[in-house]
Image (spheres, grey):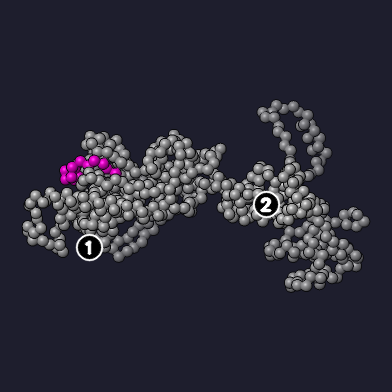
């Protein structure tokens, strides 16, 4: 400027390496640029530089300078200049020029101006009325807090006590703003406090931190009474946090063991082991059936193409013919066990069906453990003897039934028949140990009582161990809860949104309690295929019912509460040679997944899992 009038403007975009300069060097770079730009005006004359960066006033007396600042200082000393500090609020001219223009101004030529006037005179019908918008500049949070302080009666009371020197922690600055230990005091304005918490929690710069992190961030600048408690309550009631964040607590729900059976093969467990290699006889799965009292089991090879009628025939031939009709059958909610045919068959036989709650295999924990033992046996057999698994299955059943069980303190075979089975290592002479006296009945009764007592002690021991790693959780009727949608390996891919899908859906209303650790939920119509009774470990309490409930209709939820994706395209193929054969691999694109997320799968797996594709 010269004589109060602007004679030149200049602007420059920093280079790539200059962007990384610290703030002090960037401000000094602007001074150097101006001196070089207007050297012909400034050299030899006294000039004044106004800046909103106060530290530039002391550039000539600063003791420690880096090499860049030393080089620039040599240039600056060629000029007769004075640096003046100009506060940012008062530096309106430079601030206005440094802002990006929100519109482009062009001068219309006379012909264009006349044409615009003629078009403006034409009356044309419009479908919608024009809407007029006003640009409103909202004051900053700090300005809102200062304005709220002036209107709050509690703040006025604190100011009076400051004057009486009763509040040593509080102070007033020159503008009359109230501070607490260099932190801005927020008055008791719930809307203002919520706005501050929203900015610190839900904005893109914070992305839902935990309560402690959020408190540590806010307490640097703000203070109000019971601040930490309010922040903890705010975060705990955040709907997004409740749906997407993982729990780091002990699993909910204390162990509820099933009642010890009264007699052999009256109460049984059932489950399937699927996904096995198809044998020459066509078997690709195993039906595992266990007696809950003696722990004895039957392992039956199956084909997945069997219909429910075939399963019923096998069940009659292999179980009912040997052990009679059981009183109860405990199983998961597999398609066979919940089918109408199977239910009608068991009603006709007088058997009560007990199903586990969705995605809670602990209900059938005994059969799940036996499945693991059987799979390990078959792996060892295939590795050691190089035989097919269906050929090993009868001996695997014998080995399991003749092995010692800690909960029984005997083998299942001995618990079922009263004596150990003969093996090459456990031989006996004909007639040895056989009793034909009336004591045989007494011994059998004593053995049943002995097994019953052992099972009771084992259950008590297992419950005490399990409950140490669990926590009790109780809901009331009409409470709202979130429902966990758990991930699964393989082709279960978390649903439409992939891995970033929410961990919980809901909230849903509890309609009744169906047991010590099970609750019935009020599910929407599009989840009618899902069983509505859930174990407490799959639920999380909703502390505040939000105005909007997540739309689960867009998520393809299976009846077992998992997401499943289907292969839609083969993108590539490769072959890996081994000593015996060549294995084909295909790069598969899954439904609702991009090409970048395609996976390599074996041909055998794809043909087994998706035979029609």
544 relative position to 116: left or right: left
Is residue 324 covered in magenta? yes
Secondary element at tag 2:
strand
Q: Which mark is residue 399?
A: none
Q: Quadrant of the N terminus?
A: bottom right
The residue labelled by disc 2 is 223
Q: Is residue 63 above or below residue 585?
A: below
Tell me where the magenta segment starts and ends, as one range. Answer: 318-330
Q: Between residue 351 and residue 556, name the one nearer to us.
A: 351
540 relative position to 124: left or right: left
Residue 164 appears in view: yes
* Mark 1 Cα shell of 10 Å, populated few (<14), some (14-19), many (≥20): few
Q: Is residue 310 above or below residue 226?
A: above
Q: Residue 459 location in percent, x, y?
A: 31, 51
**Which residue lies at the image location 43% right of the left edge and 38% below the top edge?**
521
Q: Residue 130 location in percent, x, y?
A: 71, 32
């Amino acid at each position: 400027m010269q004589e109060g009038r602007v004679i030149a403007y200049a602007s420059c975009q920093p280079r790539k390496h200059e962007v990384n300069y610290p703030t002090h060097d960037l401000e000094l770079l602007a001074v150097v640029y101006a001196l070089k730009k207007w050297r012909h005006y400034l050299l030899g004359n006294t000039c004044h530089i106004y800046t909103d960066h106060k530290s530039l006033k002391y550039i000539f007396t600063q003791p420690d300078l880096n090499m860049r600042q030393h080089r620039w200082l040599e240039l600056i000393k060629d000029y007769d200049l004075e640096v003046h500090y100009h506060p940012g609020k008062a530096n309106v001219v430079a601030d206005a020029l440094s802002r990006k223009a929100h519109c482009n101004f062009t001068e219309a030529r006379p012909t264009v101006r006349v044409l615009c006037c003629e078009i403006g005179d034409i009356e044309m019908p419009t479908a919608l009325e024009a809407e007029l918008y006003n640009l409103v500049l909202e004051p900053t949070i700090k300005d809102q807090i200062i304005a709220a302080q002036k209107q709050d009666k509690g703040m006025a009371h604190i100011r009076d006590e400051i004057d009486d020197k009763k509040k040593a922690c509080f102070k007033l600055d020159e503008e009359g703003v109230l501070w607490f230990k260099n932190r801005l005091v927020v008055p008791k304005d719930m809307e203002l406090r919520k706005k501050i918490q929203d900015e610190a929690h839900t904005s893109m710069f914070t992305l839902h931190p935990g309560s402690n992190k959020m408190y540590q961030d806010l307490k640097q600048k703000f203070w109000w009474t019971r601040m930490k408690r309010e922040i903890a309550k705010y975060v705990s009631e955040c709907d997004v946090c409740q749906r997407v964040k993982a729990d780091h607590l002990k699993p909910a729900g204390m162990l509820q063991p099933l009642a010890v059976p009264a007699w052999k093969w009256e109460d049984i467990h059932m489950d399937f082991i699927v996904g096995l290699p198809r044998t020459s006889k066509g078997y690709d799965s195993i039906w595992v059936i266990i007696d809950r009292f003696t722990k004895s089991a039957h392992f039956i090879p199956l084909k997945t193409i069997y219909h429910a009628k075939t399963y019923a025939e096998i069940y009659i031939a292999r179980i009912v013919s040997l052990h009679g009709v059981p009183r109860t059958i405990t199983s998961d909610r597999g398609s066979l066990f919940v089918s109408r045919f199977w239910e009608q068959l068991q009603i006709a036989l007088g058997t009560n069906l007990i199903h586990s709650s969705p995605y809670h295999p602990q209900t059938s924990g005994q059969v799940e453990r036996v499945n693991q033992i059987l799979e390990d046996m078959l792996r060892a057999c295939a590795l050691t003897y190089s035989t097919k698994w269906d050929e090993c299955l009868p001996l695997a059943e014998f080995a399991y039934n003749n092995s010692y069980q800690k909960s029984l303190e005997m083998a299942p075979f001995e618990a079922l028949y009263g004596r150990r089975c003969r093996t090459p290592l456990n031989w006996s002479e004909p007639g040895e140990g056989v009793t034909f006296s009336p004591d045989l009945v007494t011994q059998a009764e004593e053995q049943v009582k002995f097994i019953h007592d052992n099972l009771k002690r084992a259950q008590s021991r297992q419950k005490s161990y399990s409950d140490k790693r669990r926590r009790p959780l109780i809901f009331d009727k009409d409470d709202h809860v979130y429902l966990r949608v758990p991930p699964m390996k393989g082709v279960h891919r978390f649903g439409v949104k992939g891995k970033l899908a929410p961990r919980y859906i809901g909230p849903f209303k509890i309609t009744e309690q169906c047991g010590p650790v099970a609750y019935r939920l009020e599910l929407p119509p599009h989840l009618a295929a899902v069983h509505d009774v859930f174990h407490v470990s799959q639920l999380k309490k909703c502390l505040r019912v939000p105005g909007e409930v997540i739309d689960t209709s867009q998520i393809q939820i299976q009846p077992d509460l998992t997401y499943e994706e289907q292969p839609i395209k083969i993108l590539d193929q490769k072959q890996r040679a081994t000593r015996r054969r060549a294995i084909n691999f295909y790069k598969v694109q899954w439904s609702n997944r991009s090409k970048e997320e395609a996976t390599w799968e074996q041909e055998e797996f794809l043909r087994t899992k998706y035979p029609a594709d």
